[in-house]
Amino acid sequence: MPKKLVIKVTAGADSPERCSQAFTVAAVAVASGVEVSLWLTGESSWFSLPGRAAEFELPHAAPLPDLIESIQAGGLITLCTQCAARRDITENDVLEGVRIAGAQVFVSEVMADGVQALVY
């Protein structure tokens, strides 16, 4: 089993099943004791803002706010720097515990020993 799982989610409300899968996999990994780093990019960037996850709906899927809470309990959520800038999102806007970081940090995470990376 990998020491760390890095997940990059690019989908948001524009592709709800793909989006939900990424958050679900991240939450299950955290619950399984895996170190998780979830990266919000593209349309998923909006879920870094308070209240936005509550607007997301997908039948037969766990509520996104619950998944985010589970991920934050044992993992890290990062918002892409460029994605944040394109949406005028700043560090003052995001959910508590969400960091904003760029490609250099992402590459550093995925290149570390024992890391498995997934992109949704």
Image (cartoon, rainbow, N blue to C red):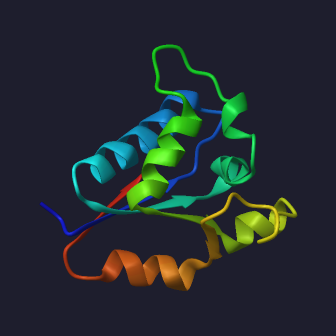
Q: Quadrant of residue 92?
A: bottom right
Q: Is residue 87 left or right of residue 17?
A: right
State the residue at coordinates (29%, 82%).
Answer: 112
Q: Is residue 59 left or right of residue 12?
A: left
State the residue at coordinates (66%, 54%).
Answer: 42
Image x and y of residue 85, in percent = 81, 69
Note whether 42 is above or below 82 in the view shown.
above
Q: Is residue 43 left or right of residue 63?
A: right
Res 89 visible: yes
Image x and y of residue 7, in percent = 41, 57
Note whether 62 is above or below 44 in the view shown.
above
Q: Quadrant of residue 115?
A: bottom left
Q: Is residue 35 left or right of residue 101?
A: left
Image x and y of residue 20, in percent = 49, 34
- In this view, the residue in front, 67 or 108, is 67
Q: Quadrant of the N terminus?
A: bottom left
Going by the picture, which residue comes out furthest to the left? Answer: 1
Image x and y of residue 73, in percent = 43, 55
State the residue at coordinates (50%, 28%).
Answer: 17
Going by the picture, which residue comes out furthest to the top? Answer: 59
State the residue at coordinates (32%, 81%).
Answer: 111
Res 120 visible: no
Number of numbered markers: 0
